[in-house]
Every structure is written in C-alpha cells, then in structure tokens.
Image: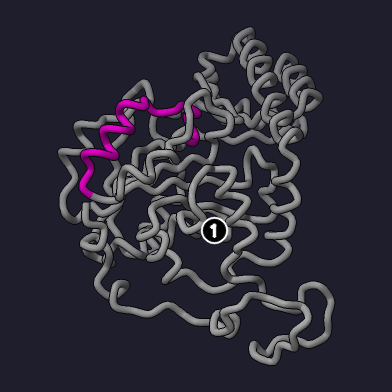
Amino acid sequence: MKIDTLVRDNIKKMSSYSSARDDYKNGYDENLIYLDANESPFENGINRYPNNKHNDLKTVVSKIKNIEKDQVVFGNGTDEILDLIVRVFCNPNEDKIITLPPTYGMYDVIAKTNSVENIEIPLKNNFSIDKNKILSLSSVKTKVLFLCSPNNPTGNSFDINDLNDLIKDFKGIVVVDEAYIDFSSQKSLISLIDKHDNLIITQTMSKAYGMAGIRLGMGFSNKNIISYINKIKTPYNVNTLTENKVLKELSKTDELKNNISLILNQRKVLISSLEKLDFVQKTYKSDANFLLVKVDNADLRYNQLLKKGIVVRNRSNQYLCQNCLRITIGTGEENKIFIKTLNEL
C-alpha cells in the first residue's frame, strides 16, 4: 500500500517546525553555553527545553518493544497521538473514520474536533467485530479504522484472525489501540508493523505501567508514518519531568511484572465474588484491568456504592451496555472492601 497517497496534500507539502535546539545538531552538552532558545539561564533542573528527539527514551522503549527507534513516536497521552493520526490522514469535511461502538469515546471526539465524519459500525451482541460490514462500508474516503483491543468498555480482545484480515484488507490506516494489552492473554500486534505499511499500534504508560499522572502515550509504526506524525506534532510535547520519570520506572521490570500479576490474580478473585451476587446478571470475560458487569439496575447500584464511598463507572449510556457497570481492578484490600460493600447492598 502506498501510504503517501493517503496523507493529506497540505501535510505532504509543509515543513515541520524547527526549534532552536533542532538547529544545533550535536545534542545537549551541559558544558556548553546555550544562548539559542531564549530560555532562563538560571539552572534549576527544568530551565532548559526538553530534548525534542527523546533519544534516551526511544532507545529504552524500542529495545523493550524490539523495534527501531525511528518506529516510535511519543505523545502527551495516547490521545494526542490519535489526534495527530486523524490530522495527518483525514481532510476536514471530506474524509471519514470508522469506529466500533461501544468503544473508547475519544475517537469520536477527535473526529468531531477535526470535522471528520465518524462511521459507527457496532460490535455484534457478543462484542465481536463485524468484519464484513466494516469492509463493505469502507471507501477511498474512509481513511482510518480504530480498533481498541482489548476493548474499552467491554474488556474483550478481538479475534486475532479478524484483526489480521482487517489490517490486510482495509484500504486505509488501521490503528490498533493496545492500551490494555499488558493484561491480555493475546500478544501485541507490534511485530506486524514491518509487514503492513498501514498499521499503527498505540500503547500507554497509564495502565500497567502505573503512570497515568504524567501522560505519556506511544505510537509504533513504519518509519514513513512516524515521520509524518513527527512533522505535525508540537515541539516539546513530552516534558523533561515526564521523560525522566518514565526512564526511572522502566528500569523496574520485576515490579512491573509483579503488579500485572497481582492485577490478573485479583481479576479472578473479583469475577468469582461477583458471580455469587444475586443482582449481578453477567460478568463479561475481560483481558483488561477492569470488568464490565451487568446488574439488575445500574443507576441504583452505582448510587448505592457512591454513598458507601466507592466510585465505579456506569456505562449504561453505551451501546450494548444497558445496566452495565465498569469496575477497575483495585488492590487486594480495596477489592475486599468493594465485595463486602456489594454483599451489604
């Protein structure tokens, strides 16, 4: 697939913004005197602009993901990367995206913000993909297909054969949002970015890595697509404090594995406990760090829990999610309190 034909003409023609530190090609050296970027000269650890190339972070992340450094782009949260993807490929008031509700709500917000039509093709009743309908409703104007797997709010991973077929047969960009992939029994599709020119994988530091507060999203694709995203992203979108914190936390591999294991074990405990409650009608299979649970009356149960000091998410306004609560897997102690409270309702 010729990706350049999918990119907006104005994006292909434009030049990216060049910062002062971009003009100086030799990297940061603390022994030099920098009078090029109108920064404060008074050293406090954050008086200088961040390294706009994020070379140290790219080196670490690319090694973890077993890809090349120039196949990585970072964003101020994954939402920034998703927005950049739409802006690279979709002409306002002309092109379209496809989403599969119920799914992550920011895809639709991003489409509306960029004056791009969102074609919603609902999941089947078992939360699986309607692959044939997606392909039949796609055209030269449907530039981007968003697939959230594991899906939010349903928690399930999509069938790997369906994903592979869509990546192969869809004539636009396929974005697989893997925010919850670390909790899934299904492997990441990141190894496919060298085989499929139209594939973009997004992941986040907010879930398994436990760094939601610092906002770091990651995009992985072929070098061509990454170069277009870099072309239009704002400079210094990932700050120095974020980069330093992530580098520190990524070295704690044993702690990360242990935390994921604890979440997976607690997920089993929570499922077992929920299934014993009379007002719980169904607990859906989950590959994420949350459960979608169908109850007798979601509004009632939500408010009862809130009065007891426990906040869950009522997803009843989502397609196929009537009377469903989304429950994040907490610590063992939090889950004990949660289950005890449910038993008292």
Report the side of 72 relative to 240 (left or right).
Answer: left
Judging depth in this view, the residue of 197 and 286 nearest the camera is 197
Judging depth in this view, the residue of 156 and 308 nearest the camera is 156
Q: Where is residue 82 in the image (x, y as percent from the top left)?
A: 44, 55
- Give the colour scheme shown: one colour
Rendered view: 200 above or below 21? above
State the residue at coordinates (37%, 21%): 126
Residue matched to label 1: 74
User: Type of residue at label 1?
Assistant: Phe
Does 263 lie within the magenta span?
Answer: no
Does 160 lie within the magenta span?
Answer: yes
Q: Where is residue 2 in the image (x, y as percent from the top left)?
A: 22, 56
Query: What span is in magenta?
Result: 151-171
Judging depth in this view, the residue of 327 and 174 nearest the camera is 174
The kind of secondary structure element at disc 1 is: strand
Point out the image quarter for the C terminus.
top right
Report the side of 1 relative to 210 (left or right).
Answer: left
Rendered view: 280 above or below 119? above
State the residue at coordinates (47%, 69%): 233
Displayed quadrant of residue 77: bottom right
State the residue at coordinates (61%, 15%): 271
Asked if residue 323 shows in the view, the reply is yes
Asked if residue 325 shows in the view, the reply is no
State the residue at coordinates (38%, 40%): 192
Q: Where is residue 320 in the image (x, y as percent from the top left)?
A: 39, 28
